[in-house]
Image (cartoon, coloured by chain):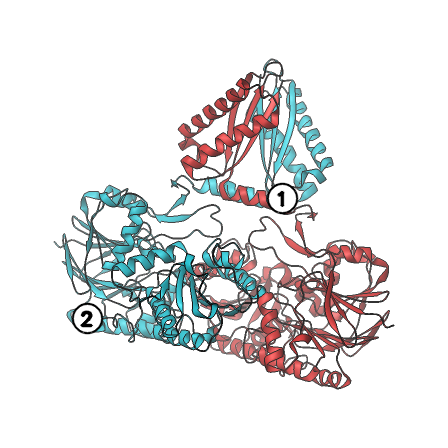
Chain colours: A cyan, B red
Amino acid sequence: MAEKLKIMSLGGLNEIGKNMTVLEYGRDIIIVDCGVGFPEGDMYGVDLVIPDVTYLIKNQNKIRGIFLTHGHEDHIGSLPYVLQQIKAPVHGTRLTLGLVKLKLEEHKILDKCKLITHEAGETVKAGNFQVEFIHVNHSIADAVAFAIKTPIGTVVMTGDFKIDPTAEDGMIDLGRFGQLGKEGVLALLCDSTNVERGGYTANEMVVTESFDRLFKNCDQRIIVSTFASNAYRLQSLITVAHKYGRKIAFSGRSMENILKVSTELGYMKLPPKTVVDINQIKSIPKEKLVIVATGSQGEDMSALYRMAYASHRQVEIQAGDRVILSASAIPGNEKAIGNIINELYRKGADVVCDKLSEVHVSGHACQEELKIIHGLLKPRFFIPVHGEQRHLRIHAKLAVNAMGMDPRHVIISDLGRVIELTGRSCKLTGTVPAGKVLVDGSGVGDVGSVVLRDRKHLAQDGMLVVVVNLSAEDGSILSGPDIITRGFIYVKESEELMDNLREITLGALEKCRNRQARDWAAIKSAIKSDLSHYLFKTTKRNPMILPVIMEL
Amino acid sequence: MAEKLKIMSLGGLNEIGKNMTVLEYGRDIIIVDCGVGFPEGDMYGVDLVIPDVTYLIKNQNKIRGIFLTHGHEDHIGSLPYVLQQIKAPVHGTRLTLGLVKLKLEEHKILDKCKLITHEAGETVKAGNFQVEFIHVNHSIADAVAFAIKTPIGTVVMTGDFKIDPTAEDGMIDLGRFGQLGKEGVLALLCDSTNVERGGYTANEMVVTESFDRLFKNCDQRIIVSTFASNAYRLQSLITVAHKYGRKIAFSGRSMENILKVSTELGYMKLPPKTVVDINQIKSIPKEKLVIVATGSQGEDMSALYRMAYASHRQVEIQAGDRVILSASAIPGNEKAIGNIINELYRKGADVVCDKLSEVHVSGHACQEELKIIHGLLKPRFFIPVHGEQRHLRIHAKLAVNAMGMDPRHVIISDLGRVIELTGRSCKLTGTVPAGKVLVDGSGVGDVGSVVLRDRKHLAQDGMLVVVVNLSAEDGSILSGPDIITRGFIYVKESEELMDNLREITLGALEKCRNRQARDWAAIKSAIKSDLSHYLFKTTKRNPMILPVIMEL
């Protein structure tokens, strides 16, 4: 009897980011991508979100390799953490692994990891799987899709992609997709990020043309902020800067990293004497300068942020600067970006960021492109991935309504759900552990729901510590109660309230003593309840109350 | 010598919301609008933001009246607070004052306030000012602009507006604007909210047509979420529901309030037996029902939120429900709205919210409409208002580039800046107190920057209380140190860390004793510094550390 193929998402399903998919057949497991997610608004203090890989740790002996589609954080960012929990060779294209290398070096684990470079067109054997690398277009160079041959059929995973016939490094290999379709595709896992948008994603060339228009006859200093990882965009800025006799400097650590890696690996063509160090820009006249900065998402302390708020060492925004925001807002960042734009305007900059200026295009396929992929591959089963629930549903609808798929052949899965495929059937069966592991500072997984709940409570109304010394002999008060608050109220203007709180604490202690309650937990709970009741009545607030009893 | 006219914004300039403008001439002050703002993302725990009215309190004797343009929260929401600080008659149209009344009743101050109702076309004398009410279109009925005659010329304040020739209650009175232009306008203060958008705002009728299309031949239950205050929208839903033989029920307190007020005042035409109580919907077949709910901004615990997350008493979203989101996201709310949409899809609802469906139009004028107002009024001076810095700048540019205004006659002011006008000149002079007064629970202004900074710190990394009992005689340790943490780390899994923290505290105390440091502040500071150093080294986190020393 033939084995079943299992497909499980540990990330990237019902969420944007943190992409990680596991394929299992018999005694073999391969993993596609290993990305990070970014904290939601209520994950106070959390730096990163990584996938829960418990299932992989338990099945370490089956793992044949990790395959990376491209070098974006949401596809490679968890590697430094995951590679400390499981062992596996990492396969990817040259630029992707160049970026991975940098990351593993930073975490000081590069020497323990095995990275294997491939080119689009190559096929890698990994146990029962054969993984073929297929060239696609995306907002980073060297991106690939995978056609994964398994004993029961071929699974195609697009990774992030779009169709750009004008792309610098060549158009997506639609021919190969067509061929695969003719050979027969068992299942398609396809990017859903832009499925809400009709039509086509504009070509990257449109952005280059806009840069040309904005640089031409411009006598201002030009500052551009864009995603660091978009090497095409950086190349296009370098080329246009050179064309108009401008020097170009880069600011922001991730920007410098990408530039270094992609130049070393030959992904960037640098015209002579065009790129200059950000420390050397002082001598260059304004109208001969372009500065490219991180911070297009409004990130605190990014290069653009510091330039806007006058805390950047080399650059301060000045009246007349032309600032181009070559990016669109990732949902949740709109406010932060808006604040920077306001600050740029306040400094008198001429800000270019609206849709009409065409200074950004997306890296993901819109509806018409998605239909082309569906039409070429004609998969038996379709599993929409890389999207929130609404993207998955709309993508499923597109497959059924526009492409005529049988709705029973379209599977909307969830994190940790196991999809079981035979050559003829596809169904959701069990679950494996999956979820969000939170990274805070150097701690991985030590911040969970209890800590987050407390942070939320503290953020909302602050806190109040009540300390009292009781006699071990008779429970009488030796000193205190002392009350300390933080984040609750401005104490100097609330002396009466503080006096009342002390009175209420004394009252609670008195009541406990009268009814012979000597149990600390009971005393604490009495103090907490009386204080909280009084506070809500007088202030309509609910600070965290921490009674501390010391016994002597 | 003629007096100068002073114009000061206490809100609504370099911010969206909290609109409040003060006009002063000689011994007379009038106030236009009195709105609330909503907290920014970093204003943890804050419920509302209201303007600082110190200047008005100091000049109470000059105040001749408050004039309201329309009944939206960002134009009337601060009245219950401000009217407890200053006394002034409140002038507005019928619906506007109907909503104000509800608000003042809730705050139990209605009997102390004087509300005076006017109709568009009327003029009110207030000291040296004559305030004319001019009908405009907006996303709430009974909205007006003001033409304010002063001894040195006429100032026009548009309030929020758009041009909608198909509006239920009649098109904006462009004729009057044209007449004023011919008579001569000294200064224009004009809404800048939509100045980034080219073209025209679509007519409200477009939305009605979309509802008709979506209700026709629909055999699903229909649930619509929209802004409660948009009575046109509610009316159009009632009309279309009636047309297709559906009953309509409303859910959400603000929705019920608006419905009550606008029905009582005759702003709503209710066909017989169409509107039903939300408690009476059980007996109505799904395909005969429309439910209109608050929550179009994804607000926690709003009606739509509760329906999506199955905590609404009467309605739970079910597979097949058609849910229409008739609203667009206010910046900052994108994530919350996205989460609800995902949940609706997860429940199997058919969600209609994209731009192509045309189920929402803005209430604010786009560029072409703004140009019409500028063209009709031909003001000598122009002061863009109701917008962040970028809106003000773009609006200023529009006035100069498209309308040919002299840039020296365009004034971008700021909160609290005083604009001084004579018949021939206009300049920014001094400042008056202005800013954000924060409302948290029942406290007004008792949460300031120190409290917010602490809340932010607590939210980020939590806190750690260290309590120790010292002997008053020799400074020896009588009990402790006890360490309590909240929001920092999961303590049960961090016993070693907690032990180390106690050791470090003991070490710090020992050092203090050795060098005879008996001053509490010094001891606390030593503990704090040693702990914080150790914590950052081991966890890369920086919790708030609160040393508490009790002396016996």
Residues beneath discs 2 and 1 located on the same chain: no
For badge 2, the amino acid type reads Arg
Identify the subunit bearing mark 2.
A
Image label count: 2
Residue B53: x and y in percent read 75, 56
Q: Which residue is mark 1?
A: B450
**For residue A164, which numbered disc appears in the image?**
none
Q: Are there few (<14), some (14-19), or many (20+) residues within 10 Å of tag 1?
A: some
Q: Percent position (x, y) of residue B385?
A: 66, 69
Q: Amino acid at mark 1?
A: Val
Tell me if I can see residue B272 in this picture. Answer: yes
Query: Percent position (x, y) of residue A542?
Result: 61, 41
Disc 1 is placed on an element classified as: helix
Q: Quadrant of the C terminus of chain B?
A: top right
Which residue is painted at 60% across and 16% down in the image?
Answer: B471
Q: Which residue is mark 2?
A: A176
Q: Is residue B288 left or right of residue A87?
A: right
Which residue is pictured at 60% across the width and 13% down the height? A473
**Which corner quadrant holds the N terminus of chain B?**
bottom right
Can residue B98 be seen here? The reply is: no
Q: Nearer the viewer, residue B536 or B44?
A: B536
The image quarter in which residue B434 lies: bottom right
